[in-house]
Image (cartoon, rainbow, N blue to C red):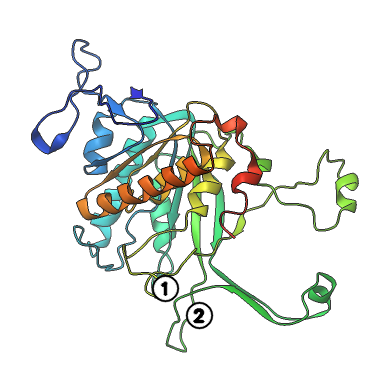
């Protein structure tokens, strides 16, 4: 079972001295192998070991981005496994994730690749297909260029324009990679979502009455332009070789539906981006990460986010009471 709490200043679950892991629940033969964990905490532990002992059907949403096996310079993880070994590892991750996810839960998997290996993301998705149903496939657009023409002038764009950023490909063989995938997996393929929670206004207001809508919001669709807040290595030091923007887990969680008692898990927490997104939304998080240096950075970011929210006077307010206007422009 997951113990929900807004802070882990007072730990109720006793701990083993070895690696600081919480003990399993004692006294009940059915629960002897289940981990009694505190929420709003990142555990320095491998996600496979952690999920093996986590209570079944205790997680509402999983949002994560595993290593891509592209030889990224992680400090504790070798990102160059043999293809079969890598896919087997993610297959096991998916199997265990299905066990801990609630029946109406959502698993949002962000995965990319490289131009010379375009099938990587789909190979990973196929491993998850053994355990989940692919309900939605979202395209995360990191950079887009819009060329001036008659249609853009009608929308107020008077010249060529580019948004976002990308890593240039210095060859005439491949195109610059300006997008990644967010695979939305569920157990049934029929989980009801809160689509208008991340809705966008109609460009042409006549569609509000044309489609008999009650308000000026429509489904965002499956193409999401999400820019990085700051590009590592440009204006900030490189803290982690592969992070996604905070807006990515923020949108995923809101799309699933924010409600009282929601618990979000990130198996590959890294430097805590999913955690700080959860704090902004007022929902509980749990994370696992094998690199202590990343956990330390994550805890620092969490502390900073809590201070920021405290200043906004919304830290202890229920999600339903938080006004969108307080943080709707946080990612602009």
Task: State the CA–CA distance, disc 2 to disc 1.
Answer: 26 Å
Q: Secondary structure at mark 2?
A: loop
Rendered location of residue 125, percent (x, y): 43, 52
Q: Foreground: 310 or 234?
A: 310
Query: Is residue 268 visible from the viewing direction of this image?
Result: no
Q: Which image quadrant: the C terminus?
A: bottom right
Identify residue for label 2: 175
Between 98 and 234, the one lying in front of the other is 234
Q: From the viewer's perspective, is 216 left or right of 18?
A: right
Residue displayed at 22% across by 18% down: 25
Residue nearer the viewer, 87 or 263? 263
Q: Is residue 139 above or below residue 19?
A: below
Above or below, comparing residue 171 to residue 28 in the picture: below
Residue at the far bottom in the pictured view: 172
Q: Residue at x 32, y 58 (%)?
A: 67
Q: Residue furthest front?
A: 311
Left or right, 194 with respect to 253, comes to right
Q: Quadrant of residue 307?
A: top left
Residue for badge 1: 235
Q: In the picture, which quadrant includes the N terminus?
A: top left
Residue 81 appears in which quarter of the rendering? Answer: bottom left
The vertical placement of 145 against 98, above or below, is below
Which residue sits at x=56%, y=32%?
A: 319
Q: Does residue 151 show up?
A: yes
Label 1 sits on a secondary structure element that is: loop
Residue 19 horizontal/vertical position (percent): 12, 38
């Amino acid at each position: 079972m997951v113990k929900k709490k807004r802070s882990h200043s007072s730990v109720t679950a006793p701990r083993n001295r070895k690696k600081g892991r919480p003990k399993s629940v004692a006294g009940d033969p059915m629960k002897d192998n289940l981990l009694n964990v505190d929420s709003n905490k990142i555990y320095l532990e491998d996600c496979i070991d952690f999920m093996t002992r986590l209570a079944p059907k205790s997680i509402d949403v999983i949002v994560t981005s595993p290593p891509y096996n592209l030889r990224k310079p992680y400090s504790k993880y070798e990102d160059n496994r043999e293809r079969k070994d890598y896919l087997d590892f993610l297959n096991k991750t998916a199997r265990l994730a299905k066990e801990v996810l609630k029946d109406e839960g959502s698993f949002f998997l962000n995965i990319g690749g490289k131009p010379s290996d375009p099938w990587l993301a789909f190979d990973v998705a196929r491993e998850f297909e053994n355990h989940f149903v692919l309900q939605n496939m979202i395209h995360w657009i990191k950079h887009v260029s819009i060329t001036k023409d008659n249609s853009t002038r009608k929308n107020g764009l008077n010249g060529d324009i580019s948004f976002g950023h990308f890593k240039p490909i210095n060859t005439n063989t491949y195109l610059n990679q300006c997008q990644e995938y967010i695979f939305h997996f569920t157990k049934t393929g029929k989980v009801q979502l809160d689509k208008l929670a991340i809705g966008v206004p109609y460009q042409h207001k006549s569609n509000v009455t044309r489609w008999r809508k009650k308000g000026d919001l429509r489904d965002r669709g499956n193409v999401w332009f999400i820019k990085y807040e700051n590009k590592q290595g440009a204006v900030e030091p490189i803290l982690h070789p592969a992070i996604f923007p905070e807006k990515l887990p923020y949108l995923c969680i809101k799309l699933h539906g924010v409600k009282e008692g929601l618990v979000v898990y990130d198996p590959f927490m890294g430097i805590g981006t999913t955690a700080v997104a959860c704090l902004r939304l007022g929902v509980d998080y749990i994370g696992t990460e094998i690199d202590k240096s990343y956990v330390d950075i994550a805890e620092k970011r969490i502390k900073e986010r809590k201070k920021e929210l405290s200043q906004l006077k919304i830290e202890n307010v229920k999600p339903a009471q938080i006004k969108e206007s307080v943080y709707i422009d946080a990612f602009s």
